[in-house]
Image: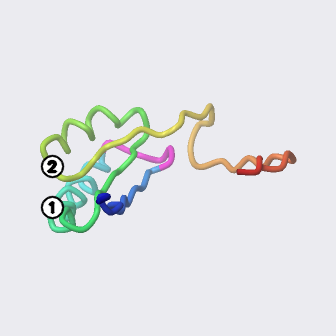
Amino acid sequence: MTTPRRPLVAGNWKMNGLRSSTAELDRMIEGAAALAAQVDLMVCPPATLLMSFAARASGSKLLVGGQDCRAEPAGASHVRSSRPLPAV
């Protein structure tokens, strides 16, 4: 018998996170407790906030992950490639 897949809901701040974002994180931590029976929740802050978010979420039902780094000063950048995606 196999274990059914468990949904994961994840989101990030792209590169726009501020230290004041911890108030938003606190609300997510509170909400994660209510949803923990149904889904896993993860938030991925910018690298500059990763340690403080992980410490704040420690022991809660909210997972904290990292995101890719990019050499841009702020915001999401969309780079389009002329190469086709590989077949899977």
Q: Is residue 5 above or below residue 46?
A: below
Residue at (16, 67) in percent of width and height: 34
Give the residue type at disc 2. Answer: Ser
Q: In this orientation, which residue lies closer to the viewer: 30 or 34?
A: 34
> Image check: 51 left or right of 35?
right
Which residue is at 35% across, 61% downward? 5
Helix, strand or loop for disc 2:
loop
Q: Amino acid at mark 1?
A: Ala
Which one is nearer the viewer's eye here, 88 or 14? 88
Image position, residue 4 (x, y; %): 32, 63
Query: Residue 49 shows which numbered tag?
Result: none
- Total labels: the figure holds 2
**What percent of the width, then of the height, locates residue 68?**
53, 37
Region rendered in magenta: 14-19
Asked if the residues shown at circle 2 and circle 1 are in contact, with their CB atoms under 8 angstroms apart, the answer is yes
Q: How is the image coloured?
A: rainbow
The answer to which quarter of the image holds residue 66 is top left
Q: Residues within 10 Å of mark 2 (few under 14, many from 20)?
A: few
85 horizontally vs 59: left or right: right
For mark 1, give the secondary structure: helix
Q: Please name the residue that numbered disc 2 is placed on.
A: 60
Dominant secondary-structure state across the stretch colored magenta: loop
How far apart are the alpha carbons under marks 2 and 1? 7 Å
Rendered location of residue 31, percent (x, y): 20, 65
Q: Residue at x 31, y 43 (%)?
A: 64
Q: Give the residue displayed 41% in from the left and 46% down from the top.
A: 17
- Residue 55 counted in the magenta span: no
Q: Residue 38, relative to residue 13: is it above or below? A: below
Residue 17 belongs to magenta span: yes
Residue where numbered disc 1 is placed? 33
**Which comes sooner in the sequence, label 2 or label 1?**
1
